Amino acid sequence: MPAIVIVGAQWGDEGKGKATDQLGNRVDYVVKFNGGNNAGHTVVVGGDKYALHLLPSGILTPAVTPVIGNGVVVDLAVLFDEVDGLEARGVDTSRLVLSANAHLIAPYNCVLDKVTERFLGSRRIGTTGRGIGPTYADKMNRVGIRVQDLFDEKILLQKVEGALELKNQVLTKVYNRRMVDPGEVVDELLGFVDRVRPMVADTSLLLERALDAGQTVLLEGGQATLLDVDHGTYPFVTSSSATTGGACTGSGIAPTRIDRVVAILKAYTTRVGEGPFPTELHDAAGEHLRKTGWEYGTTTGRPRRCGWFDAVIGRYAARVNGVTDFVLTKLDVLTGLERVPVCVGYDVGGVRHDEMPMTQTDFHHATPIYEHLPGWWEDISGVRSFDDLPANAQAYVRTVEGMIGARISVVGVGPDRDESVVLHDLI
Ligand code: IMP
């Protein structure tokens, strides 16, 4: 039985939560493998809206075991806030499993995230301010705190003291902030230990055994391809591996066990935070996409930057992730346009690029080359079969599919769980 990866193809917020949730009835495990509470999944179930930041969206499906993998960074206060919020709405969260190797977002890393952004001024990344970058930096610097450290008080104190040795110098001398007391941090973290203990497992082993037993494992990527620390628009990226490779390192599942890679691709493009975005619209058309698509950040509430569909990005996502199936989301948002522009390549200083430019400088200077496809006016939210879509909507899907190097298997026509047109089953 398969391991299936789901990733975002653009800059995030493509609708992964809904896709994961739709598959929820047919999978046994949903694993979050990267990121932390910078993610924002909105899932609508029977008219009820759930905004999840840290928990895997499988938490809403009773038969699924949700897993937070080793590649995730966990803010325990946020984790239990989210758990308590769901429990209060009648959602059972007792199945949640947490990797012993996941890193913890210590309170000082949230402080550092915010003060660093302020310090960077015009060079800021536009982070979510949740401590994600500093926590991954600690992991790579080998001064991170892991979930398992909670079970050894002596080691925990040693590690927090070690991490703070340099950070306190930086906080006080560079940023003029108050010193952090290691004992206070340890007390705060240990305050969670009794609730954490029953959730913790060797999740790599758990998932290997599940696959051996014929169960289906869905690996859910946070953020997206162009926010990946290696393959994204660096430095305007998140600090984790949001592509298929990250699914392996962030879960402990080997690449040879992965059968299917599903990339979620919005029928237009959005981005939050700073960084290059060739098809961005600064006019009424951009405002129209933002209003119609309700493009405001789930985590931060920030208005998202909006632009037309970019096939160069679609092709790139297909390549670096090994995409087998695309889910094209929010096609309904394009309803009512006379002509729908699609970016088919870039002009960089008079030279045409059909693939992502090799350098950041070229990507910053990329001007989109558009093809204009005929629009449609009919309300498509009730459509459930591809043949019932207006001819021009069908043509839009087929034309885009021809440009991005993998088949489009599902088309989203509205926010609710069942508002989709399925061309090929994903499982
Ligand atoms: P960080 O992940 O908070 O470090 O932020 C780094 C960049 O990734 C910023 O541009 C964020 O806006 C962006 N980002 C992080 N998480 C998400 C997400 O779930 N959706 C979209 N953008 C995100």
Image (tube, rainbow, N blue to C red):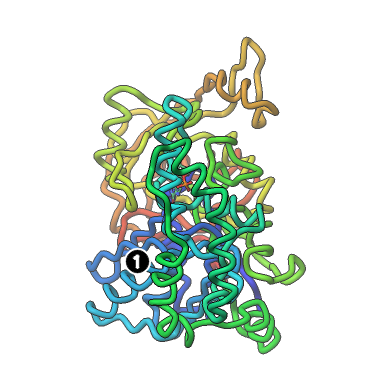
Q: Nearer the viewer, residue 95 or 190?
A: 190
Label 1 CA crowd tier, 10 Å (few <14, some 14–19, many 20+): some
358 in relation to 62, above or below: above
Q: Quadrant of residue 291?
A: top left
Q: Nearer the viewer, residue 357 or 163?
A: 163
Q: Looking at the image, which residue is at 60% across and 38% down? A: 403
Q: Quadrant of residue 47?
A: bottom left
167 in relation to 143, above or below: above
Residue 245, x across and y down, in percent: 68, 57
Q: Nearer the viewer, residue 125 or 28?
A: 125
Left or right placement of residue 9 versus residue 58 in this view: right
Q: Which residue is mark 1?
A: 417
User: In what element is the residue under mark 1?
Assistant: loop
Q: Mark 1 belongs to which amino acid?
A: Arg
Residue 115, x across and y down, in percent: 41, 40
Q: Looking at the image, which residue is at 39% across and 70% down? A: 188
Spot the residue most to the top: 350
Residue 162, x across and y down, in percent: 59, 59
163 in relation to 215, above or below: above
Q: Nearer the viewer, residue 146 or 368?
A: 146
Q: Quadrant of the N terminus?
A: bottom right
Residue 126, x across and y down, in percent: 42, 37
Q: Quadrant of residue 349?
A: top right
Left or right placement of residue 285 versus residue 97 in this view: left
